[in-house]
Image: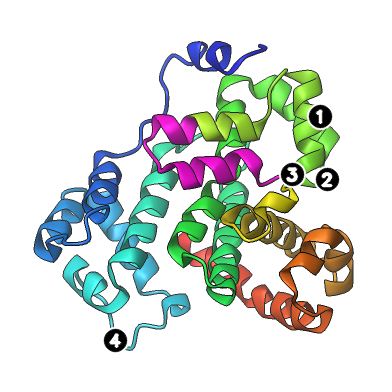
Amino acid sequence: MKTIRDFFDAIEHLPALPKVVQDVMQMLANEDVDINALAKVVQRDAVISAKVLQMANSSFYGATRTIKTIDDAIAILGTSRLKSLVVASGVMNAVTHVENLDLKQFWRHSLLAANISRALAIDLGKDAEVAYIAGLLHNIGGLLMHLVMPETSLEVDALCKGLSADKRQFIERQLVGLDHCQVGEALAIRWNFPSEISHVLRDYATPSSQHVTGLVVIVYLAVHIAQGLTQEANVEEILQNLNAEIMQSLGLPSEDWITRIEAYRELASATEMYI
């Protein structure tokens, strides 16, 4: 396969994003959304509603009382965070089995990257929930590649074990002719995600100086930190593997990053209850 069109033409049944996710994204694009109508839309999908409530009641979100209904979730968490939970629930339920791929481990890493993306976005004054969704979806292209070409993807996995996203991207292009970033961008477009998210999926693995203040660099950092934490690397090792130019451009002293990364370790355990 050499082109994105070839890749998608080979898919007999493209994973579909649940309609409730599409409806919620469309409704929340309107600042004057009717909260009651929003709750009713989410409640139409029992599986996603249950998952949203499970996530909302986790210690990570710090609810002071049990959240029993979607109305409660909206009131306590707000519409932006509800959107993130609905998207996360819907995307995780869009693909329930992939041959020779540990989906729990896949989502464990993706959720950790999402949570770190949100934390970084808050610190850097960016949209935290958009960062969360972009972090969650950063490797959705890799998941789709496993569905379409399982044997080749296993070969890529073996060659890329422990390597960074940019090195994986290079190896994918050598073996397949395209990479998970391109596939992820194309899938996000087909799923009607906003361009700010599809662009992050396209560029996060190799951010350039033009992205230093944007969501691309936030997801780049989050993915690398999440990978380091998953591999149980120490903070110094994680920092050494991050792009020095980007780190300097953010203007945050290394001592701050040591404290941040140590704090992000706690997010790893918070992801377990979502899977």
CA separation, marks 1 and 3?
14 Å
Q: Earlier in the sequence, mark 4 or mark 1?
A: 4
Q: Earlier in the sequence, mark 2 or mark 3?
A: 2
Q: Earlier in the sequence, mark 3 or mark 4?
A: 4
Query: Which residues, given as a range, are shown in magenta?
Result: 187-205
Place of residue 215 in the rendered image (x, y in percent of width and height, measured from the top left): 57, 56
What's the colour scheme?
Answer: rainbow
Q: Nearer the viewer, residue 143 or 21?
A: 21
Q: Residue at x 60, y 62 (%)?
A: 112
The residue pinned by badge 1 equals 171
Give the label on residue 163, or none: 2
Quick check: 56 left or right of 119? left
Q: Amino acid at mark 3?
A: Thr
CA separation, marks 2 and 4?
42 Å
The residue pinned by badge 3 equals 206
CA separation, marks 2 and 1?
10 Å
Q: Nearer the viewer, residue 54 or 203?
A: 203
Place of residue 63 in the rendered image (x, y in percent of width and height, measured from the top left): 35, 83
Q: Earlier in the sequence, mark 1 or mark 3?
A: 1
Mark 2 vs mark 4, foreground winner is 2
Quick check: 17 left or right of 268? left
